Image: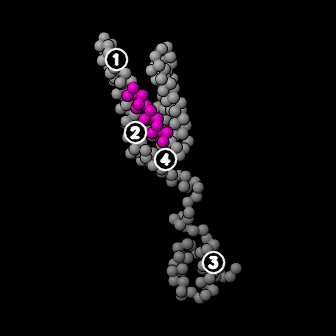
């Protein structure tokens, strides 16, 4: 190690930077020793590429299944119980329409489970599954509402039940419309899944 190398090792990064700015004034041996010392030292923090830990901490706070997406997933998993209960309550019916509606309820329950798992795993197909789930749920709400309207028209004596069905159907359709709009405009959805619905 030459005396120039020893002298440059004792200098701070700022002193080396000042010398490097005027490196044309140095003799060739001093210039080479200066370049070698600068290359030997790690780059300043501002110029260092981010490590894995730094990039994980710098992750976008909207990335991931958090916030309203968690509430959506909880609704999906809670909806499984509701759909199964609804299907079981219809099992005593002799009508083929009631049987078809019970099968629709069980299908929605299974789809809720698959969609919830897909969202939690952030699968590529999540948004398509969400679209199908929202459409099927709104369709189910529309069927309930139409059933209430038909009941009201056919038997005015059951007006209280018919109004309850119409109200329930409207609330279901409105809820799915709100979730549909959320998946269209949410920044978290766009960052988590790469695009909106």
Which of discs 4 and 1 lies nearer the camera? The answer is: 1
Q: For the point 53% across and 76% down, which residue is it?
A: 17
Using the image, tell me which numbered label, if any, was put on residue 180.
Answer: 2
Question: Are dots 2 and 1 in contact, CB under 8 Å?
Answer: no
52 or 153: nearer the eye? 153
The furthest residue to the right: 1
Residue drawn at x 48%, y 50% as measured from the top left: 194
Residue at left offset 55%, top offset 76% = 16
Report x, y in % for residue 138: 40, 32
Residue labelled with disc 3: 36
Query: Secondary structure beneath disc 1?
Result: helix
Q: Dividing the image into 4 quarters, which one contains the N terminus?
A: bottom right
Mark 4 or 3, nearer chain start:
3
Queried whether the magenta region covers residue 124, the answer comes back as no
x and y, in percent, of residue 144 in the image: 39, 24
Disc 3 crowd, CA 10 A, few/some/many (<14, 14-19, 20+): few
Q: CA distance from mark 3 to mark 1?
A: 89 Å
- The magenta stretch spans which residues? 128-143
């Amino acid at each position: 190690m030459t005396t120039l190398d020893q002298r440059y090792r004792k200098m701070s990064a700022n002193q080396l930077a000042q010398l490097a700015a005027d490196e044309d004034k140095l003799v060739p041996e001093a210039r080479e020793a200066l370049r070698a010392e600068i290359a030997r030292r790690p780059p300043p923090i501002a110029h260092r590429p981010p490590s894995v830990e730094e990039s994980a901490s710098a992750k976008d706070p909207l990335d991931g299944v958090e916030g309203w997406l968690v509430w959506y997933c909880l609704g999906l998993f809670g909806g499984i119980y509701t759909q199964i209960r609804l299907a079981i309550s219809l099992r005593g019916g002799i009508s083929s329409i009631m049987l078809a509606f019970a099968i629709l309820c069980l299908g929605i329950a299974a789809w809720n489970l698959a969609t919830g798992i897909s969202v939690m795993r952030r699968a590529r197909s999540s948004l398509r599954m969400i679209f199908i789930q929202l459409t099927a749920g709104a369709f189910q709400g529309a069927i309930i509402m139409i059933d209430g309207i038909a009941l009201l028209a056919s038997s005015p004596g059951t007006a209280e039940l018919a109004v309850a069905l119409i109200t329930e159907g409207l609330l279901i359709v409105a809820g799915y419309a709100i979730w549909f709009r959320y998946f269209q405009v949410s920044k978290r959805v766009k960052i988590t899944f790469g695009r909106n619905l």
